[in-house]
Image (spheres, rainbow, N blue to C red):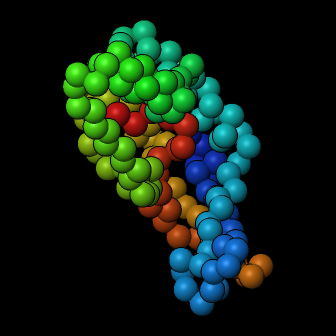
């Protein structure tokens, strides 16, 4: 991470389009894209995730009431807290909940904004540089019915295990 480099060969994936059960293969929505990523890249992503996770927790960057994407917490913890809060209110207060699932959140990360936020939060320069390098010049080759396409720019830049705040 200190050199903030992610090898170009590791940024290239094969994306296999698997038919969704019960869906027509005549429309794009009838397929589930699965990206096959270089194993070395996955290992490096996990190392970076662990370092970022440590940094985020050490610096108390996330609010205490954020449960998603944090080590040692889950949606079960959130549900238990909600039930607890409702029970202790003893019917003396109203309760409401808003739950949001943003479709395609990782696929639509604005890298420039992400890097700016990381700078504002004073992430180490090496983490910022690595994130910037990791998210650029990515390519994929779509494989449908065992027929590969030429490599194209992969606009889905966010690794699934790295923090995005």
Q: Inspect this view and state whether residue 162 appears.
A: yes
Q: Is residue 2 above or below residue 29?
A: above
Viewer-closest of 129 and 54 = 54
Viewer-closest of 161 and 25 = 25
Total numbered labels placed on residues in the image:
0
Q: Residue at x 43, y 57 (%)?
A: 104
Q: Quadrant of the N terminus?
A: top right
Image coords of residue 137 (percent x, y): 47, 55
Q: Residue at x 32, y 38 (%)?
A: 97
Residue 50 picture quarter: top right
Farthest residue to the front: give it. Answer: 91
Left of 60 or right of it: where is 50? right
Q: Quadrant of the C terminus?
A: top left
Image coords of residue 40 (percent x, y): 71, 39
Q: Is residue 71 above or below residue 97?
A: above
Left of 148 or right of it: where is 6? left
Left of 160 or right of it: where is 97? left
Image coords of residue 82 (percent x, y): 40, 27
């Amino acid at each position: 991470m200190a050199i903030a480099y992610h090898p170009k060969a590791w940024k290239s994936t094969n994306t296999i389009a698997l038919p969704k059960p019960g869906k027509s293969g005549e429309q794009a929505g009838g397929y589930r894209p699965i990206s096959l990523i270089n194993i070395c890249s996955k290992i490096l992503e996990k190392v970076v995730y662990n370092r970022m996770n440590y940094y985020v927790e050490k610096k108390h960057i996330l609010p205490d009431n954020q449960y998603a994407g944090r080590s040692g917490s889950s949606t079960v913890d959130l549900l238990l807290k909600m039930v607890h809060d409702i029970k202790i209110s003893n019917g003396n207060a109203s309760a409401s909940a808003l739950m949001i699932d943003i479709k395609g959140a990782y696929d639509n990360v604005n890298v420039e904004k992400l890097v700016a936020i990381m700078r504002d939060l004073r992430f180490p320069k090496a983490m910022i540089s690595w994130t910037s390098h990791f998210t650029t010049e990515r390519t994929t080759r779509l494989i449908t019915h065992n027929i590969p396409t030429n490599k194209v720019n992969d606009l889905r830049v966010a690794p699934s295990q790295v923090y995005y705040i």
